[in-house]
């Protein structure tokens, strides 16, 4: 039996007249995610999407695994597509339940039927009841439990009919690319990959910028960021990474500015450079992993000063989250283990022992007024290394 994959989506239903555009984007993204697994037909019907393999032995498990990382999909089921006839549906149901019982030690079940094809001679209650009885006869070890069964056999009767029992949750959200582009400032830490993931989840296509301080930070620190970007790239369907040399700027700030202000001024440089890259790639915003009060550079005063360095909106999806909540998401999306690898980040260089927690904007601007900002930024941009990460 060749498995068909049934794909469900939720929030796209709220899109009214724009719904087809979102559906088409979702299908495009699904095609990209499934690329290389073998030929399939992807068809939209009844506000769902069916992925029908056109080859023998299509790797449905891997396909489902990939689809659960495509934003916009709320759940996925491996289903059997059948001719709409009572004999076929009942016969195949017995076969499917036999497969299920080989895999799981289930003891109770129920049948749930949806009949969309009103020409079918039995109503849904009748199908559930009769099919339930057939299953009980074939599998004496099973009992019916309508309130809390070990498994449910779903039967959908339409032009074709579908039977399945597994519902694999998806990541939800909206299809990437349906909501413009934003530029993520990605460090090697825990927070920024989570921030990027949360924004991509809302349909935003990300580009990423990373600042590194070679030779003070190692090649391994850079590889770690590339690895994180690769993980995000799965959700983002490809991700362009700009790696920006930051050593010269850091040394310069360290030399020219009072110690307690170096972190905040460095943060402003990062924002300015990221904004230049963002404007060039058509991004409509910047994304960071900042959370109020997490460190000295994330007090409201510091955020005000950092924010004032740019005019693009800065999206900070972690802003109201505790560290433990951010960690929870990073574990879920798989970035945590890599984020906690102990390689130096450029931010840990030249750290002030006592950074200001309440920097003042006027003072910051005054301190910056003697710096060669434009020239430094231009040199950093000229030294950028751009990688397209799949
Ligand atoms: P993260 O866990 O993301 O590193 P953090 O809590 O360590 O965040 P900071 O080091 O103050 O916080 O950085 C705040 C934000 O600035 C980061 O979330 C990230 O968006 C950006 N950022 C910090 N360092 C870099 C870097 N080297 N390259 C690019 N962006 C950076
Ligand atoms: Mg950090």
Image (cartoon, rainbow, N blue to C red):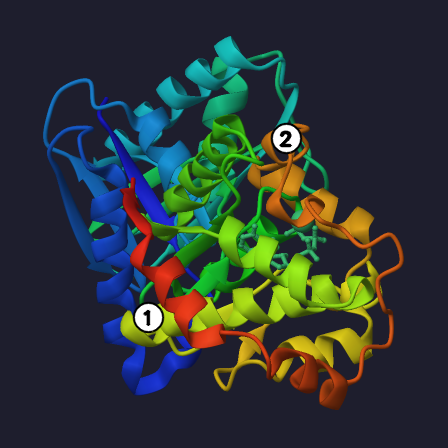
305 is higher (above) or lower (below) than 194: below
| Quarter holding ligand 1 | bottom right
| Residue depicted at x 40% and y 71% | 375
Query: Where's residue 295, x and y in %?
Result: 82, 59
Residue closest to the eye, 333 or 138: 333
Q: Residues within 10 Å of mark 1 (few under 14, many from 20)?
A: some
Residue farthest toward the top in the current orientation of the protein: 102
Residue pointed to by mark 1 = 178
Along the polypeptide, which appears first: circle 2 or circle 1? 1
Q: Nearer the viewer, mark 2 or mark 1?
A: 2
Q: Residues within 10 Å of mark 2 (few under 14, many from 20)?
A: some
Residue 204 found in image quarter? bottom left
| Residue depicted at x 79% and y 62% | 259
Q: Is residue 120 visible?
A: no
Q: Which mark is residue 343?
A: 2
Quarter of the picture holding the C terminus = top left
């Amino acid at each position: 039996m060749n498995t068909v994959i049934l794909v469900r989506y939720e929030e796209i239903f709220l899109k009214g007249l724009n719904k087809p555009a979102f559906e088409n984007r979702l299908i495009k993204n699904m095609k990209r995610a499934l690329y290389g697994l073998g030929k399939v037909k992807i068809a939209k019907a009844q506000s769902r999407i069916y992925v029908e393999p056109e080859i023998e032995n299509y790797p449905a498990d891997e396909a489902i695994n990939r689809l659960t990382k495509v934003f916009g999909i709320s759940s996925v089921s491996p289903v059997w597509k059948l001719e709409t006839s009572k004999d076929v549906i009942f016969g195949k149901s017995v076969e499917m339940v036999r497969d299920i019982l080989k895999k799981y030690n289930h003891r109770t079940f129920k049948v749930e039927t949806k009949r969309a094809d009103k020409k079918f001679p039995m109503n849904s209650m009748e199908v559930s009841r009769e099919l339930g009885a057939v299953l009980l006869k074939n599998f004496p070890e099973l009992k019916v439990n309508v309130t809390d069964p070990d498994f449910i056999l779903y039967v959908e009767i339409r032009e074709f009919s579908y039977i399945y029992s597994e519902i694999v949750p998806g990541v939800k959200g909206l299809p990437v690319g349906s909501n413009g582009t934003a530029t993520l400032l990605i460090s090697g830490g825990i927070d920024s990959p989570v921030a990027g993931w949360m924004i991509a989840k809302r349909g935003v296509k990300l580009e990423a910028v990373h600042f590194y301080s070679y030779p003070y930070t190692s090649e391994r620190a850079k590889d770690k960021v590339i690895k994180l970007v690769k993980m995000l790239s799965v959700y983002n369907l490809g991700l362009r990474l700009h790696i920006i040399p930051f050593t010269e700027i850091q040394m310069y700030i360290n030399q020219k500015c009072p110690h307690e202000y170096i972190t905040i001024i460095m943060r402003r440089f990062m924002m300015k450079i990221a904004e230049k890259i963002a404007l060039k790639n058509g991004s409509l915003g910047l994304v960071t992993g900042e959370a109020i009060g997490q460190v000295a550079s994330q007090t409201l005063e510091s955020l005000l000063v950092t924010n004032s360095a740019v005019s693009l909106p800065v999206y900070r999806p972690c802003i109201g989250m505790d560290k433990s909540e951010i960690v929870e998401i990073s574990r879920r999306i798989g970035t945590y283990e890599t984020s906690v690898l102990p390689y130096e980040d450029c931010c840990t260089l030249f750290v002030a022992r006592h950074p200001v927690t309440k920097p003042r904007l006027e003072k910051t601007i005054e301190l910056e007024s003697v710096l060669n900002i434009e020239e430094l930024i231009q040199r950093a941009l000229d030294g950028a290394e751009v990688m397209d990460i799949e």
